[in-house]
Image (tube, coloured by chain):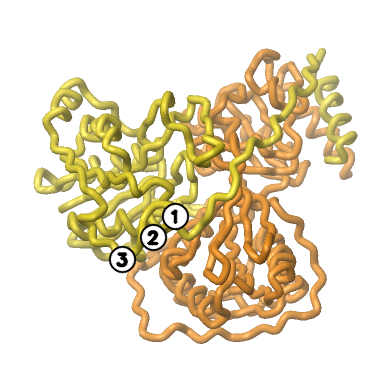
Amino acid sequence: MKIVVTVKLVPDTNAEKRIDAATKRLVRTGVETVLNPFDEYAIEAALQLKEKLGAETTVTVLTMAPETGKEVVRKALAMGADDAVIVSDAGLEGSDVWVTGNVLAAALKKQGFDLVIVGGLAEDGNTGGVSGALAEHLGVPGLTNAAKIEVADGKLRVERETDSGHQTVSAPLPAVLMVTMGVGEPRYASLKGIMGAKKKPITIVPVAELALDHPVGTDGAKTELLEIGKPAERGKGQVVTAEDGPSGAKIIFDFLKERKLV
Amino acid sequence: MQHVITFVEHKNGQTRKVSYELATEARAIADALGGKAHAVVVGPGAQALAETLKTYPLDVIHVNEDGDVDKYLLDPAIDYLEAVAKSVGPAVILIPNTLQGRDIAGRIAARLGAGLTSDATGLKVEGGKVETVSPKLGGSSITTCAFKPGDYGVVTIRPNSFTALAGGSGASIETVEKPAGKTYVMLIESESEEVSGEMGLEEAPVVVAGGRGLGGPEPFTTLLKPLADALGGTVGASRAAADAGWVPYSLQIGQTGKTISPNLYIAVGISGAIQHKVGMRTSGTIVAINKDGTVPIADFADLLVVGDLFQIVPELTKQLQAVHA
């Protein structure tokens, strides 16, 4: 079985982020780029399936990123993925979720797949729209929020997290699957994995090879970014030490009352 | 873009506050665009819910009681929404930013070739263009995006961003025909409701969240739940508490969990590291209870009470219950 995991490279969450006022884009220089934390769960899910299904199953990592993203993608290879494809092109800058969906879908068609696994929300843009876009563009079932995954007889059966509980949903392959953190903590790369990753193939695909029907980058985007601003910072509030339970409770109660919250 | 369509999430006709928030906001945006405000309600219970929605300022409520909506994952609902969108013409589609709402939004945007923006906390119309305002990068920046006029646009809206105001001139309820020639394969085999009757974390007006300081799973039910109930809210947790297995991940607030904006957030035994802060920094009022006065949350809570949470929380619950008694 051919599994493809789509990943996004994002600026490190713990680093301070800066937006260039002129280009309205994130300043990526000087900020470490990492795998979107949610996507590590997608890789973990793919590797668990590979372990269950045996050696004929391959795991490919697919991303849209600058060529410098190679080093970040290598982390996914060190975790155990077999190879990686990076769609890389200067023209992709400023792409929105519509363009990203088109580009990744075209790359997936070119590549071939039985199962596409996508992480949950992205750490930066946070639209969570890519898995749905892929299901639409590829014309295959799109299952979301999967915590447990089974594959048997060309069929996918997943346990999904819903707003109020769980659902078991089945669908035929090929399919697109978005996973949650419920699949289990992403594994650490072993030393052997890290060494081995250096020899695993990373293919760079220019956009021209994908023969897209739509323009990419800012020209193809359906949304226009007008402004990026800073939110009003929350000021430091009161810090009060409570003598005991009742006095602590009274401090909070009076505060809530003053703010008309009770 | 002329019209506004809001997609109404529900289960057997039971919906949540955010549906009424969006129905109210749909009117405001439709008026600014000179268009009509539509709602789409499909699946068993749709008709009854449409009657309730009629008390909100909508023009047309499109309904179908089709059982396939509950039997198959996402696809039937998206087909109905597509059918309405195509019959209405270019519109901005408002969808709640919930688990299901995000799924629907991603699919319908791709299908209509529409722009998609997400987790918006504000909407406005400038020069005939709909603009959406969303906190990004963990709330450290606020982005304003515009849809191209004359196109479809899809936006997911963070619950609690708008006020629901009843008062309508009586929307018409129309049946939307079942889209023809569709076959569905994502079969919902079984379903379990674990937090049945509970408010969704993302739309609760008050959230009482617990962290490492609680020391185990029991205080979530014995301490936090009664406090949340007394305030008309629900219980959440930090990642530390979810990782420890004290609560399910569905209650986790923060970077890898949910992002919420309740009117009141009470952090109990939570230090408030950046990964947690990004999930709740846009809350109206933040109150923290912690045994340590130097924790990071001291820098952004409106009130930090330094003391023993095991003594303060039950006392506070008692005082609040006395008000309502």
Q: From where the camera sits, is residue A156 visible? A: yes
Nearer the observer, disc 1 or disc 3?
3
Colour orange, chain = B
Residue visible at 74% across and 71% down in the picture = B31
| Residue A192 percent location from the top left of the image | 15, 23
> Chain ID for label 1?
A
Residue A213: which disc? Answer: 3
> Amino acid under label 2?
Ala
- The residue at the point 82 percent across, 71 percent down is B167
Give the vertical position of B140 relative to B63 (above or below). Answer: above
Look at the numbered disc 1 and give the secondary structure of its residue.
Answer: loop
Sequence order check: which comes first, mark 1 or mark 3?
1
Mark 2 residue crowding within 10 angstroms, few (<14) / some (14–19) / many (20+):
many
Instruction: Work out whether residue B109 or residue A169 is closer to the camera in this orientation and state it.
Output: B109
Residue of label 2: A133
| Residue for badge 1 | A129
Which label lies toward us, 2 or 3?
A: 3
Front in this rendered view, residue B157 or A167: B157
Real-space Cα distance between discs 1 and 2? Answer: 6 Å
The answer to whether the residues at label 1 and label 2 have Cβ atoms under 8 Å apart is yes
Chain that is coloured yellow in the picture: A
Q: Amino acid at mark 1?
A: Gly
In the rendered structure, the answer to whether residue A165 lies left or right of residue A47 reads right
